[in-house]
Image (spheres, rainbow, N blue to C red):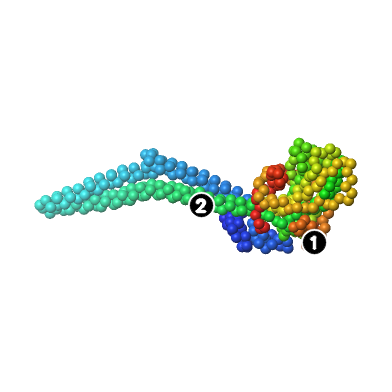
Amino acid sequence: MNLRRTLATAVVAVSTPAVLLSAGSAALADTTPAVQQHKPSYADLKKAAAEAEQAYKDAVAAKAASQQKLDDTLAAQESVNHPLRVAIAAAEKALTAADADKAAADKGVADAKAKLAAAEDEAGKAAAQKALAAAEATAEKAAQAKTEAEAERAAAWKAAGDARLKAVQEFSKAQDAPAEALKVKNAADKAVTGASDCVREQGLTVLANGLPSKAVTGKTVDFSFTVANGTDRTLDVRPLVFFRLEAKNQFQHFMKVQWSDGTEWKELDSHLNSHTATVKAMQPGARTDVKMRMTIEKGAPAETGYALFAGDASDQYNPCVSGPMKRYNFEVLAADSKPGKVDDAKPATVDDKNRPETGKPAQDATAVKPAMSNVSAKQADAGGSLASTGSSSATPQLALASGAAVLLGAGAVFAVRRRGSKGTN
């Protein structure tokens, strides 16, 4: 992954969702809105954030290594045994010798000139002239040698200076890298946080079918619930189901509620909310039914009970998508009661927009073959009924999952969302 490009896309995805960000999946072209097709997936954002974090750690480590290298370089150059220091010392020594040779040669020229001036006859003048020429040649060579020695000394000092400068420049680059990497990391983390915010989807519904408004103790009641994806998203849906008697916690064992995975009956925990099974890749407009049954034992110390249903879901862009929660109240009748024809319990919407965060649900187990029906596309309206919105067949795969909830006071609204949900994305 091109880290900077992915992070730049991720930041835009959080701050300006309407902008087309990057090439989307052609496979989703028929079912996914144009904006989502061009958004980075949540997995992409997580990967980019992990890469940015590693890049930041690498930059910090590189800065420390560069600082150590600078310290080592400067300290080493102070040693008389360092090659650069040895070269400087040799150049200085050579220049000192060349300077002495030139001074001696210059003195020889001066002496030769004095002898030439003092010569009285032609023979003496000729000899002095010859000596002067030789002295001047020696002086010229000495001057050239000194010039070369000076150049060698300058080169030795320059080499040492260049080595120091290179070390400082390398450290300077490494010094700025952590700050730049931190900016990228923060942007990536912000993108992940933005994508992690829970999205509210009114079209994601879980509704009970045939749950009676009155339940006689000692008898088993068969009913079901329907999961309907009335959104424009392809979702992995975890239906949340919770049943409770209006009695003390220690009396909850009087009620036994089970759901069918198509092969066997699974029992709900009487104290915690349960995510029955994950409906994988549920297409927009699809719905599926899950069979349930409830038995309240004779002598149950309760006159009423209730059930909560909701849809917790995720898609490739949002790990938290939540639908509205519905509450169904029912009466608990004695074993010898004959209520006659009993109406279905009516759904009521629970004000759960400010639910606190709960523990993460368990990971999906191996897929199971559910006994579920997939019919024409439906969507639940505010009152809880299923309204037809078109047709779309689907065959969702199920996987076992479970979660934990927090009971909220006398109203018994249960915390089953990761955090307070935002408006529809």
Query: Mark 2: which secondary structure?
Result: helix
The residue wearing badge 1 is: 388
Three-letter amino acid code of the residue under disc 1: Ser
- Decide if residue 392 is on the left or right side of residue 74: right
- Residue located at (65% from left, 46% from top): 357
Rendering coords of residue 153 (x, y %):
33, 48
Three-letter amino acid code of the residue under disc 2: Glu
Query: Mark 1: which secondary structure?
Result: strand
Residue 169 in view here: yes
- Decide if residue 240 is on the left or right side of residue 295: left
Q: Earlier in the sequence, mark 2 or mark 1?
A: 2
Rendering coords of residue 233 (x, y %):
71, 58
Question: Is disc 2 in contact with disc 1, using a CB cutoff of under 8 Å?
Answer: no
- Decide if residue 165 is on the left or right side of residue 308: left
Q: Which of the two residues, 115 or 337, is positioned nearer the viewer here?
A: 337
Rendering coords of residue 113 (x, y %):
16, 52
Query: In which quadrant is the N terminus drawn?
Result: bottom right
Disc 2: CA contacts within 10 A as few (<14), some (14-19) or many (>=20): few
Residue 360 in view here: no
Q: Which of the two residues, 148 or 200, is positioned nearer the viewer here?
A: 200
- Residue located at (40% from left, 40% from top): 75
The residue wearing badge 2 is: 180
